[in-house]
Amino acid sequence: MARFIFVTGGVVSSLGKGLASASLASLLQHHGYKVRIRKLDPYLNVDPGTMSPYQHGEVYVTDDGAETDLDLGHYERFTGVVSKKSDNITSGKVYQKILIRERKGEYLGATVQVIPHVTNEIKEFISNDISEEDFIICEIGGTIGDIESLPFIEAIRQFHNDNGHSNSLFMHVTLVPFIASSGELKTKPTQHSVKELRSLGIQPNILLCRSDREIPKGERKKIGLFCNVKEDCVIQAINAETIYEVPINFQKEGLDKRVLEYFNLESKNEIDLKMWSQVSKHVLKPDGKVEIGVVGKYTGLADAYKSLNEALSHGGIFNNVRVELNWIESEELNKDNILSKLSNNNGILVPGGFGERGAEGKILAIEYARKHNIPYFGICFGMQLAVIEMARNLLGMNDATSSEFSDCSNSVVGLMTEWTTNNNTTEIRSNESDLGGTMRLGSYKAKLKKGSKIYNIYNNEFINERHRHRYEVNSKYAEEFEKKGVIFSGYSPDGLLPEIVELKNHPWFIGVQYHPELKSKPFDPHPLFKSFINASKKYRP
Ligand code: GLN
């Protein structure tokens, strides 16, 4: 029978509820339990697919094709459990479902209300699609006090009542700030946040207090007293040097013990966190560094490329080097400054992206990497632009472009209007289709050419990788390209859609139509990132 852990946040946002949930899940796995983590997002978008990654962070794509919150990436990276569509819900999705039902008259004349209709939908989501899991950890997005999250808080309150108090636990993540002028840690924000939570009918069982320093026992006792929480359940979460230390720190503070005690469960294993200490050691004490120039559009929000940052760092962990990223604004790149902006890098990467703005700068960077034998890794848009660059400069097609930028009849990269999914169904799209949820999304199989570089990297003929794109490289020019040493070394199994492009006479030049970064894990780095960082380590600028 599954037990439920609800994680809420108080005082301020960005306290790392996602990481806390993922780290707790990892600890429970080490104790021998099966876990699943879910995210409940109070915003009104149906999913984050249409939201700007520069505002809300990256859109994480699951195997089954859902566009979800980036926290699901943390969950997968920390637990290895593959996330599903059924692991992320938003207010938008709840209301969409209810309103469609209402229009069909399915409520049989009833007045449709937040309680019980919206809260019932949320409760249904929480307990839906569970098989053998021992624990379901549900993270509620936002901060206590937000108007939007009220139905979610009410739903988990009801859930706790419906399912028996001993089957669900409330963990509240708060902040205990240090006030420099008085030299004191302050507990008042935590007290207020818990007061707010209790006014909504929820008494937290565990408080996870984020702090930049040790919280003395006396302060923890005080928090426990004012918040009606057992003293040993007031747990400090001191800033860690690397995120991979968080599970180790939580274990030291006894978080896993308190959770098991609450549910009256024993550990099934002698807990051993060597996996996390080894990864932390590689991150904190690497042997040398590699600099990668990532050429894209930036607004300074690091979370916009969360999985990419992580996957590159996993490549570094494997090669025992620190990977330093130089973010290069593609709009500012031109022929005159390219040398000064790119020449100190050991490798160049163009990540996924949308729209024409900055595309020419990326194309210049790709040309530079190709001509100077600098390791180049193109991901999704980075692959499409590499094909455009080579069509222009190797095949002499001066007007080569993508139909994403302009209407052209003979595009090298064109809108995909019909394709076969992994389940053999046909998807059809047109220029008029909705923007949300209508790309080639989720896991698709690809067949690799034996003897190619990509084949040797994966050491496999068939791979499954996650996609998120609307346009597709035109295979029409494959033969012409091949004469110039440009190989389409992987295709969709029906042989229609190029999945990988690589250069024969270049140390490492690979573009992939999919997003390999979404499947990389610190304890199981993705083969492409291992190989790219290894090649970059060998390249001396
Ligand atoms: N804009 C491109 C497309 O839609 C690439 C998308 C991406 O990089 N994820 O096909």
Image (cartoon, rainbow, N blue to C red):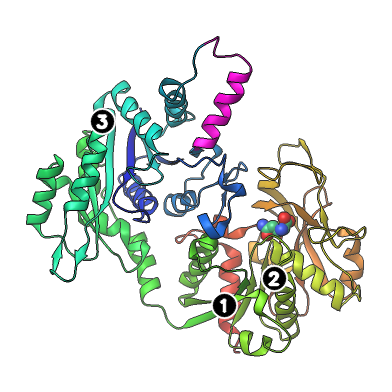
Label 2 or label 3, whichever comes before in sequence order? 3
Ligand 1's quadrant: bottom right
Q: Nearer the viewer, mark 3 or mark 1?
A: 3
- Of residues 199 and 318, the one nearer the viewer is 199
What residue is disc 2 on?
Answer: 358
**Disc 3 on helix, strand or loop?**
loop
Q: Residue furthest left?
A: 218
> Is the Cβ of the residue at disc 3 closer than 8 Å to that at disc 1?
no
Near mark 3 (Cα within 10 A), the count class, few <14, some 14-19 or many ≥20, is some
Q: Which mark is residue 201?
A: 3
**Disc 2 on helix, strand or loop?**
loop
Give yes or no for residue 418 being in the magenta stretch.
no
> Is the Cβ of the residue at disc 2 closer than 8 Å to that at disc 1?
no
Give yes or no for residue 91 being in the magenta stretch.
yes
Q: Amino acid at mark 2?
A: Gly
Residue 519 lies left or right of residue 12; in this view the side is: right
Quadrant housing residue 98:
top right
Q: Amino acid at mark 3?
A: Gly
Label 3 or label 1, whichever comes before in sequence order? 3
State the image coordinates of residue 120 (x, y, percent, origin top left): 44, 23
What residue is disc 1 on?
Answer: 292
Residue 350 lies left or right of residue 139; in this view the side is: right
Overall secondary structure of the magenta section: helix
Residue 289 lies left or right of residue 373; in this view the side is: left
State the image coordinates of residue 337 (x, y, percent, origin top left): 67, 88
Please report the bounds of the magenta region as a residue range. 90-109
